[in-house]
Image (cartoon, rainbow, N blue to C red):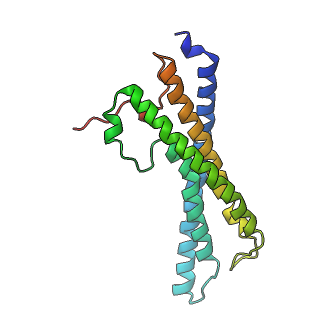
Amino acid sequence: MAEATSPVVRAVNALGSLNESAGRFACWAAAALIAVMTGAVLLGVFFRYVLNNSLNWTEEVAIMSAIWVAFLVSPWAFRNGGHVAIEMVVNAMPRALMRVVRIVINLLVLWILYRFFSEAIAYVGSGMRMRANSMDIPVAYFRAIVPVSFAMMFVVGVELVIRDGLSLFMRGTDLDLPHLSAPIEPE
């Protein structure tokens, strides 16, 4: 039980709490944006078909809200196993080998996220020179979620690699998140 209270385990659990809180906040923000998106679409339909006077900004607000929703929930989905995955082969492996495979995959994901983050910074920067079609604001404000999402996903990936690495070297310490702890058994 000494390992359960080690500073390393406490640190990874603190990182997990940070990721969980950030993910929960992002999900609530995404829910609010879904309400904004729905309201913008309904308002646009009402003005176009009932009042016969189209609003030019509702479509852009709905599209940008949808993009923000997708990027906001991505870190939460990554941490909670919500992305598409083929786990049949991995779940059939011995536990230690499964952890090694997950570490390798997550390290690859971290490298990809690092590369995407660098490109996303330039992507947002280029948006400062452009204005939104229907609103007089820089497009960069709409694009700002992209590097934020990649950074959040990177921190989640680091947490997952550390959890699997520590579980490999600290026998008897299971630091898996609940969705990773036991493979789903077929019915």
The tally of labels here is 0
* Picture residue at 55% right of the left edge, 85% below the top: 48
Question: Which residue extends farthest bottom?
Answer: 52
- Residue 25 appears anywhere in the view: no
- Residue 102 appears anywhere in the view: yes
> Relative to the observer, which residue lies in front, 127 or 63?
127
Which quadrant of the structure image shows residue 70?
A: bottom right
Which quadrant of the structure image shows residue 141?
A: bottom right
* Picture residue at 55% right of the left edge, 13% below the top: 3
> Relative to the observer, which residue lies in front, 85 or 49?
85
Left or right: 2 as drawn, with respect to 144: left
Residue 23, horizontal then vertical, whole percent: 58, 44
> Relative to the observer, which residue lies in front, 169 or 176?
169
Residue 157, horizontal then vertical, whole percent: 56, 40
Is the C terminus in the top left, top right, bottom left or bottom right quadrant?
A: top left
* Picture residue at 59% right of the left edge, 37% below the top: 158
